Amino acid sequence: MVKKDDEISISSETKGPVKSFGALMGEGEKFSRDKLYTKAVQCYTEALDLLPPDDDKSSPKDTNDRLQGLVARSACYLKIGKNDLALQDAEESLKRNKEYTKGLYQKAEALYATGEFELALMFYHRGKKLRGDLKE
């Protein structure tokens, strides 16, 4: 059996089917839509754990997958009131790409939730400025 690129086993001792990054992200999205945020966080965390270590050798696809997973998990953390963890994930997403608009938005949301209103406004503005599809 040949594994696809995005099907990486967490460990060889894992029982049951091998889950891929995409499958876990999809499950997380479904749980999030159903307002089951704790389960969504678990799926996003498992999906992020499947990715290779984040370093300069990471492929653009792995980097993009990591950014998407971090932002999705951050949004769920906000929904369950774990604002500090939401902020950590948002900031982590901006380490690789400081102009990642979804990461900027998520950081603004997390800052707003923690009561840092002026700083949140700065990040909202930064993200809006980078998005060419939004008019003043």
Image (cartoon, helix red, strand yellow):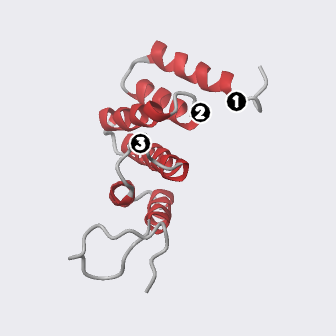
Q: Compared with residue 85, is residue 132 higher up or lower down, i.e. above or below?
A: above
Q: Position of residue 115 (x, y in %)?
A: 38, 20
Where residue 40 appears, x then y in whole percent? Answer: 39, 58
User: Is residue 39 among the parts visible in the rendering?
Assistant: no
Q: Residue at x 67, y 25 (%)?
A: 130
First reached walking from the N terminus: tag 3 or tag 1:
3
Amino acid type at mark 1: Arg
Residue under the image location 37 percent in, 32 percent down? 87
Q: CA distance from mark 3 to mark 1?
A: 21 Å
Name the residue type under label 2.
Thr
* Disc 3 packing (10 Å; few <14; some 14–19; many ≥20): many
* Residue under numbered circle 1: 131
x 46%, y 15%: residue: 119
CB atoms at circles 3 and 1 under 8 Å apart? Answer: no
Q: Amino acid at mark 3?
A: Ser
> Which residue is farthest bottom?
1
What numbered label is drawn on residue 3? Answer: none
The residue carrying mark 3 is 74
Asked where in the image residue 44 lies, by quadrant, the reply is bottom left
**Which dot marks residue 101?**
2
The residue mark sitting in front, 3 or 2, is: 2
Q: Observer-nearest residue: 75 or 57?
A: 57
Q: Mark 1: which secondary structure?
A: loop
Point out the residue furthest to the left here. 13
Whether residue 120 is visible, yes or no, is yes
CB under 8 Å between discs 1 and 2: yes
Q: Residue furthest top?
A: 118
Marks 1 and 2 sit apart, C-alpha to C-alpha, by: 7 Å
Label 2: which secondary element: helix
**Up-down relation of residue 136 to residue 106 (above or below):** above
> 34 and 101: which one is in front?
101
